[in-house]
Image (cartoon, grey):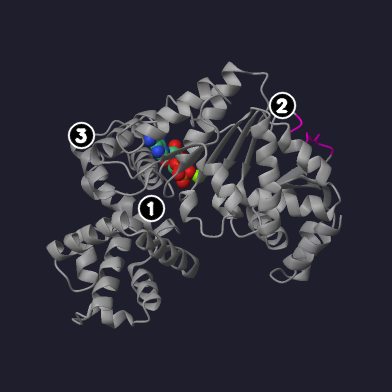
């Protein structure tokens, strides 16, 4: 397999010839699946070494080659190998726990939840497509999967297709290259339930959008259900083909906002209980007051606390919570640093970071400063005090600045676009 030679070539950049020779001379490629490379090595011993020392380099090489994440399966001797996806006829990955039962409903997600239930109970009937949008980590994928679970359970004859926006592009490109576009079309167009996660990735990619438009129409006209998630509503996807925008807006749109304190507490309690961790109310409240914008982080903190409890066997205190939060914040590449928020906001307005930190009260500077505060509030876990001190402002000024931008987001459509643009600059820069 050429790919394996290519992987070895990349490995040579970091490993010595002796290492390559010792571990890989009798290792052979077996299969290259959609997202998994299967290799075979003669002994258990070698498998363990390859798995512990080289797997991450091999995966990194595959990611370099294919620009997507890969798994590695290492077989030993004549161990049998079952192709992934050979079992089951549909393309719906089991995602343990992403069910309606495990979804905590609060005012921020009530509508999206109800819409998802309605669609799951009556697929293809009233709400087609269902378009769920909201920021990262607020439960869009969870609801999408919950619909899939429900339908698999209640309508087992229905064929479910699940795809992520960026995979749609990758698969399409691959299919075109290999002259297999007909297979590609069959695979998706025959779906009874078409689940598309993170559609924003196809915006701006012309040929993908055209193909998607046809796939969409085909499924839609057959009366089959389509559910789409996105990090923003169609009207804010500036590079989205107008025909697609119209299609999306013709269905039911449901947004998910960040959960309020009460919902965050309910989620924290639920996640903890499911992990067998009983937390006192004041600790739950403390966690929920600290993690405000992202359920994924909330979950990360609870998981860490469970680990602390298992390893250290101590009571969970507020200090332990602080440590867990710090850990999550450090490990979570999604959370940008305040410096990069300030830098990117300043850049957007053709200013310097010092301008935002200083006392200049010109209209543009003041607006940029408020925008950066708003972004810090939304993209990080910083408290109002922390945000204020990044810019030499107090907590009251910070709060009113954030409110001001929130108001503008409602009254001035341009503001939302500006926030999106700067956010995307921040996330791609850091
Ligand atoms: P998104 O797709 O919007 O980025 P996810 O659906 O991946 O977010 O959610 C991130 C994590 O938070 C998942 O583990 C999910 O189970 C959990 N989560 C989000 N919202 C809720 C909720 N309302 N109740 C329970 N868990 C939730
Ligand atoms: Mg998601």
Mark 3 / mark 2, whichever is N-terminal: 2
Neighbours of disc 3 within 10 Å: few (<14), some (14-19), many (20+): few
Q: Quadrant of the N terminus?
A: bottom right
The one of 291 and 22 positioned closer to us in this rendering: 291
How far apart are the two marked residues, 3 and 2, measured between alpha carbons? 43 Å
Magenta region, mostly helix, strand or loop?
loop
Q: Quadrant of ligand 1?
A: top left
Left or right of 231, for residue 210: right
Vertical side of 161 occupied by 180: above or below? below
Expressed as whole percent of the image width and height from the top left, the position of residue 170 reads: 70, 53
How far apart are the two marked residues, 1 and 3, measured between alpha carbons? 21 Å
Element under label 2?
Answer: loop
Element under label 3?
Answer: helix
Mark 2 / mark 1, whichever is N-terminal: 2
Tell which tag, 3 or 2, sits nearer the viewer: 2
- The numbered disc on residue 368 is none
Q: Residue at x 75, y 37 (%)?
A: 187
Label 1 beta carbon less than 8 Å to ligand 1: no
Mark 1 / mark 3, whichever is N-terminal: 3
Expressed as whole percent of the image width and height from the top left, the position of residue 326 reads: 33, 56
Q: Is residue 70 something that shows in the picture?
A: no
The one of 106 and 312 positioned closer to us in this rendering: 106
Left or right of 180, for residue 382: left
Marks 2/1 in contact by CB < 8 Å: the verdict is no
Magenta stretch: includes residue 79: yes
Q: Is residue 135 something that shows in the picture?
A: yes
Magenta residues, start to end: 78-86
Marks 3/2 in contact by CB < 8 Å: the verdict is no
The residue at which mark 1 appears reads as 328
The residue at which mark 2 appears reads as 88
- The numbered disc on residue 281 is 3
């Amino acid at each position: 397999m050429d790919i394996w030679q290519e992987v070895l070539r990349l490995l040579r950049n970091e490993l010595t010839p002796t290492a390559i020779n010792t571990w890989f001379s009798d290792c052979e490629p077996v299969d290259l699946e959609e997202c998994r490379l299967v290799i075979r090595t003669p002994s258990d011993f070698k498998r363990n070494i390859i798995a512990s020392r080289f797997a991450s380099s091999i995966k990194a090489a595959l990611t370099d080659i294919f620009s997507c994440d890969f798994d590695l399966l290492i077989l030993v001797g004549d161990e049998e190998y079952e192709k992934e996806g050979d079992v089951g006829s549909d393309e719906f990955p089991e995602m343990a726990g992403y069910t309606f039962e495990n979804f905590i409903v609060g005012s921020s997600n009530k509508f999206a939840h109800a819409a998802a239930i309605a669609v799951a109970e009556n697929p293809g009937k009233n709400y087609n497509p269902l378009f769920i949008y909201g920021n990262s980590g607020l439960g869009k994928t969870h609801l999408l999967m919950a619909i899939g679970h429900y339908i698999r359970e209640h309508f087992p004859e229905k064929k479910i297709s699940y795809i992520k926006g960026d995979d749609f592009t990758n698969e399409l490109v691959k299919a075109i290259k290999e002259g297999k576009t007909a297979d590609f079309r069959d695979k998706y167009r025959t779906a009874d339930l078409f689940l598309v996660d993170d559609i924003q990735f196809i915006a701006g990619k012309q040929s993908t959008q055209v193909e998607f438009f046809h796939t969409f129409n085909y499924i839609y006209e057959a009366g089959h259900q389509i559910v789409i998630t996105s990090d923003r509503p169609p009207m804010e996807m500036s590079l989205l083909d107008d025909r697609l925008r119209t299609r999306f807006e013709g269905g039911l749109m449901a947004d998910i906002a960040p959960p309020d304190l009460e919902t965050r507490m309910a989620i924290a309690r639920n996640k903890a209980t499911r992990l067998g961790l009983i937390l006192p109310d004041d600790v739950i409240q403390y966690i929920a007051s600290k993690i405000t914008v992202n359920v994924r982080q909330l979950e990360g903190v609870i998981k860490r606390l469970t680990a602390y409890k298992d390893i250290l066997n101590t009571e969970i205190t507020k200090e332990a919570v602080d440590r867990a939060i710090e850990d999550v914040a450090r490990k979570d590449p999604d959370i940008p640093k305040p410096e990069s928020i300030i830098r990117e906001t300043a850049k957007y307005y053709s200013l310097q970071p010092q301008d935002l930190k200083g006392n200049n009260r010109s209209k543009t500077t003041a607006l940029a400063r408020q925008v950066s505060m708003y972004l810090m509030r939304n993209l990080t876990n910083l408290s109002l005090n922390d945000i204020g001190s990044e810019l030499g402002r107090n907590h009251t000024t910070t709060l009113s600045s954030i409110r001001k931008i929130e108001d503008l987001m409602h009254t001035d459509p341009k503001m939302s676009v500006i926030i999106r643009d700067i956010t995307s600059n921040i996330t791609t820069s850091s």
